[in-house]
Structures are given as structure tokens and as C-alpha cells.
Image: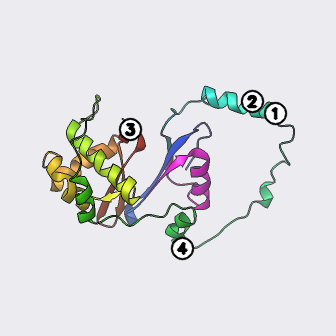
Amino acid sequence: MYMQPEIYGPVRYVYQETEDDIEIVIEGDSVWVKDLVSELSLTEKGWLQPLKFGVNSEVPEEVNESLISEDENVSNMGPTPDPSRIPIILRPIGSLDIDSKLESYGAAAQEPPTIEELAEEFDQLEAPEPKSGPLVLDPMSEAWLAELFKISLSRFGVTTLPFDTIEAVASEKMSDMEGMELELWLEKLYRMGKLMKKTAGSKISFGPIPSWMNS
């Protein structure tokens, strides 16, 4: 993976391994994400994309000003980096325990709530305001889906929900979409950058992208 130095602020790192049904999605500040990707030995894999700033040849104006200000106040930047002192980590292919690495960074996946727990919270909601915008496929369905993810995040601390859970809890309020129709609709939202998708074998989970949730 080529880590573009001009990307600052919130970013998303995505790595997919189709053959082994592996997909890794990491979101956060660019510095934290790049450090985590390097720690996981995934620097040469996947791709990085901004969530806030566009990919430009120049650093955003506010970042430029911050860097200039800091540079003027710092008289000693420390010794010149010595590449020969950077440790080299060699491990057999497939031996990296990604789950334990993520857990050490406080990013371990949480157990999803049960369908009954989610439905109990979801059924008490009042009808939300429809989503708006030129790329909205189904305003009310997107609004209800966003509400479902808000519950999963705020009440249960999980960032993704299995497809079966989404279907069982919210299908009735999302234009009665179910099965293949619902999966294709969620896939469209994923390809439009509104959702993230996680696959584990035949199991598929979806989660919200913050910019879509707040739109």
C-alpha cells in the first residue's frame, strides 16, 4: 500500500483478500491509522482514503498554518533518523494474529447484540426525518437504517451488524426489503461510500460511515 503523505485528518484504510474472505477496515486520524497499519505489517497492502479532506497535492490550508507555526517555535527537532536501527520483523505467512493486535490497540471487535435486544430498542423509536440528497436511494429506508446503527453504537458499542440481524430487526420499516433485495441495496450503499462491509466466510456485516450518519 502506498501511504500518501498528503492525506491528513480522518481517513479510512481498507484491505481485502478475496481468496481468503478477509476484509479489514480501519478508520481514524491519519497518524493513528498509519501507525496501526504499520504495526500490523500491512503497509504494502490495501489502500488509504480521506474521510474529510480531498486528496490534493498540497496540505490543507489549516494544516499548513499549524505546521509553519510549530516549525517556527521548535529549535531542536532531535537527531536525524537512522534507518539501520529500525527493527525488522519476519514471520511466517499467515501467522499474524490480527485480532490480538487490534485488541492491544483497543480496537477489538465487540460481540453484536441479539436480535431481541436490538428489536426492543428499535421498536420504541419514532419515525425519523427522511435522508436527503442527490444520492439518496430510499430516504426513509436510509433514515431507519441510520437509526438502527445509532442504537448499535450508542447502546451496545458495536460498529457493524450482521446482515441477518439488520434484516430481522429493520426489514419491515425499510420498505419490507428482505433477502437478496435487501442485501443488494446495502451493497449499493457500501459502494457509494455510505457503509462499511465486513466479511467472514459466508457471513456479511455492515456498518455506517460517520459522514453518512451525520448527513
Q: Nearer the viewer, mark 3 or mark 2?
A: 3
Q: Does label 1 or label 3 sit earlier along the sequence?
A: 1
Q: Does label 3 or label 4 sit earlier along the sequence?
A: 4
Q: Nearer the viewer, mark 2 or mark 4?
A: 2
Labels 2 & 4 near each other (Cβ < 8 A): no
Identify the residue position indicated by label 1 in the image: 73
Identify the residue position indicated by label 2 in the image: 69
Q: Which element carries disc 3, helix, strand or loop?
A: loop
Identify the residue position indicated by label 3 in the image: 214
Image location (x, y in percent) of residue 128: 25, 40
- The span from disc 4 to disc 1 (Cα, nearest Å) is 45 Å
Q: Quadrant of the C terminus?
A: top left
Q: Which mark is residue 95?
A: 4
- The span from disc 3 to disc 2 (Cα, nearest Å) is 32 Å
Q: Which element carries disc 2, helix, strand or loop?
A: helix
Q: Residue at x 36, y 39 (%)?
A: 212
